[in-house]
Amino acid sequence: MTNVVKKAILLCFLSQYILLFTLTEIQAVDKRELKKLYKQSPKPMGILQVKNLSSGKIFIASSQNLPGKLNSIMFQLDNGSHVNSEMQKDFNEVGKENFSFEIIDYLEPKEDPLYDYTEDLKILEQMWIEKLQPFNERGYNRHKKNHFN
């Protein structure tokens, strides 16, 4: 093999290595950037409903992170640790296949990234609770006590 051929092979190898290194570096930067964008993106906010398909009883809740809240509720029910003992008892008796988990309303994000959605979600949740009345034989929610000063 002549020196010219050896140099050509070496140059070809080096250019492929540099290209591979550059692509790997770009992918690493892209992954970091995508992760950063994901963390900064607003999560779906709104109202969720858990429904016992056997009895028709429902549970209404609000969250600034609906996928996270749904995941948390399902995890707690699956592990027998949900704070709503009546819903937990029914879940244990009839099984997960007899419960549905769904988002029933979304709260649109505002332009201001520092906006506090707490009060908006409380109002939206109250509207759904008044509409569906998920208490006693109709649901798992508990009446909230009003404290007046």
Image (cartoon, grey):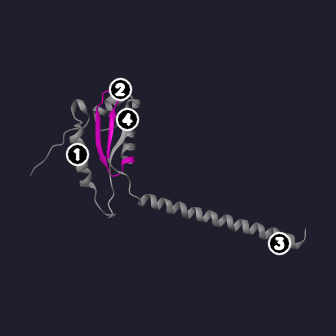
Q: Is residue 52 magenta?
A: yes
The residue identified by callout 3 is 7
For discs 3 and 1, the disc positioned in front in the rendered view? 1
The amino acid at mark 4 is Ser
Q: Between residues 91 and 103, which one lies in front from this camera angle?
A: 103
Mark 3 or 1, nearer chain start = 3
For discs 4 and 1, the disc positioned in front in the rendered view? 1
Image coordinates for residue 63, horizontal then vertical, percent: 32, 49
The residue identified by callout 2 is 93
CA–CA distance in space, label 1 to label 2: 31 Å
CA–CA distance in space, label 4 to label 3: 67 Å
Q: Is 96 on the left or on the right of 14, as rendered?
A: left
The residue identified by callout 4 is 100
- Callout 3: helix, strand or loop? helix
Q: Are marks 4 and 1 in contact (CB under 8 Å)?
A: no
CA–CA distance in space, label 4 to label 1: 21 Å
